[in-house]
Image (cartoon, rainbow, N blue to C red):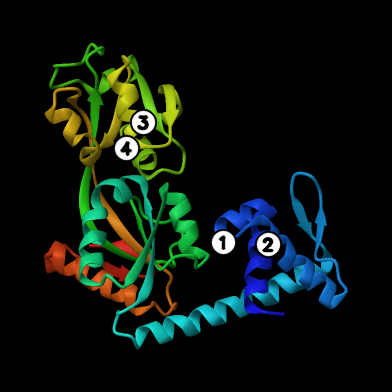
């Protein structure tokens, strides 16, 4: 039994599919199948029940999965410690970030880090804030960046940047060119929304509740997964949307969208990490570089108290 066989076995078990495991590992499907078959033949056990659509772990497979994940985790930790000794001549940095952070705020910082440490590979994964938090909790990435306070109050949280959610409309909307709209007219338009789980949507719904509105009372014409998709839909519709000022900046400057003073929500971008987990040197160095680059004023920093944000 080799470490490579265990790595392949874990990928197949997690994805429940040989082809998807091969894609993740950048191997051929035949190489993946051969590795699993060799394990089963060597130990005279069937590790998977195979069907046309997916594979399922057998009882023996479940026992091996727990041990294999533990072994791979230990090996990964050992490699990280070795990388720490290399003074970042090589290494790996894994980051998960919410859509707005990943697309608009984080790339210049990652590029700066790459220029300073070209031997460090960077893996950026992005989705909504809820999924980013899940990746951190499961220990799959080194650092996470989200747009709302995490649900898991045990996570370590640091405020690293500021943003604002604003209301925008396109040329087809009757509010286009109107600067001020009364909050009472909130229900007089349809809305293009981000998907449940996104930081943008969560903050928008919280603001509605604070102002006495039931979020379900809004008529959503579309629900989309990215800020860019929301902007595109707003441009071509008579619906309004609440989006990040970073996302809307270029379209507002070009006159393709108009900002309405209806709902404005200040928010912070938050760095989250798993308490008690030893971070690799790459992650520590990136966070230190990020703090220096942003020059966050000491009075504006967020202190940590049981994972909760406190100014």
Q: Which quarter of the picture shows residue 96?
A: bottom left
Whole-percent x and y of residue 272?
36, 63
Q: Earlier in the sequence, mark 1 or mark 4?
A: 1
Residue at horizontal 45 percent and vertical 36 percent from the top: 195
Whole-percent x and y of residue 94?
40, 65
The crowding category of the residue bearing disc 3, from other C-alpha atoms within 10 Å (few below 14, some 14 to 19, many at least 20), is: few
Tag of residue 229: 3
Residue 43 vs residue 139: left or right?
A: right
Residue 180 vs residue 224: left or right?
A: left
Whole-percent x and y of residue 67?
69, 77
Q: Earlier in the sequence, mark 1 or mark 2?
A: 1
Pointer 2 with pointer 3, Cβ within 8 A = no
Nearest to the observer: residue 304 or residue 168: 168
Q: Which quarter of the picture shows residue 288?
A: bottom left
Check disc 1 and report the residue beneath it.
Answer: 25
Q: CA distance from mark 1 to mark 2?
A: 9 Å
Q: Earlier in the sequence, mark 1 or mark 3?
A: 1
Q: Secondary structure at mark 4?
A: helix
Q: CA distance from mark 1 to mark 4?
A: 43 Å
Q: Secondary structure at mark 1?
A: helix
Pointer 1 with pointer 2, Cβ within 8 A = yes
Which dot, 1 or 3, sits closer to the camera? 1
Pointer 3 with pointer 4, Cβ within 8 A = no
Residue at horizontal 44 percent and vertical 55 percent from the top: 132
Residue at horizontal 15 percent and vertical 69 percent from the top: 292
Check disc 2 and report the residue beneath it.
Answer: 32
Residue 109, placed above or below residue 250:
below
């Amino acid at each position: 039994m080799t470490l490579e066989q265990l790595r392949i076995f874990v990928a197949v078990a997690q994805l429940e599919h040989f082809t998807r495991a091969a894609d993740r590992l950048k191997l051929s499907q035949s190489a993946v199948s051969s590795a699993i078959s060799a394990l089963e033949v060597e130990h005279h056990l069937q590790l998977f029940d195979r069907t046309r659509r997916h594979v399922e772990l057998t009882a023996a497979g479940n026992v091996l999965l727990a041990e294999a994940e533990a072994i791979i985790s230990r090996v990964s930790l050992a490699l990280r410690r070795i990388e720490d000794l290399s003074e970042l001549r090589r290494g790996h940095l894994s980051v998960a970030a919410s859509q707005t952070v990943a697309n608009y705020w984080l790339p210049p910082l990652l590029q700066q880090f790459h220029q300073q440490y070209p031997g460090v590979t960077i893996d950026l994964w992005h989705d909504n804030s809820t999924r980013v938090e899940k990746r951190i909790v499961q220990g799959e990435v080194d650092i996470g960046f989200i747009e709302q306070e995490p649900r898991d109050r045990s996570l370590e949280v640091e405020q690293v940047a500021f943003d604002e959610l604003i209301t925008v409309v396109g040329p087809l909307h009757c509010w286009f060119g109107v600067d001020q709209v009364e909050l009472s007219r909130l229900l007089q338009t349809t809305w293009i929304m981000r998907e449940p789980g996104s930081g943008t949507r969560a903050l928008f719904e919280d603001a509605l509740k604070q102002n006495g509105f039931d979020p379900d009372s809004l008529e959503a014409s579309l629900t989309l997964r990215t800020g860019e998709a929301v902007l595109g839909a707003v441009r071509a519709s008579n619906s309004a949307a609440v989006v990040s000022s970073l996302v809307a900046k270029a379209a507002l400057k070009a006159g393709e969208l108009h900002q309405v003073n209806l709902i404005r929500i200040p928010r912070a971008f938050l760095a989250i990490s798993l308490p008690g987990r030893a971070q690799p040197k790459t992650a520590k160095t990136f966070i230190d570089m990020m703090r220096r680059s942003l020059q966050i004023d000491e009075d504006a920093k967020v202190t940590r108290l049981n994972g909760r944000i406190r100014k």
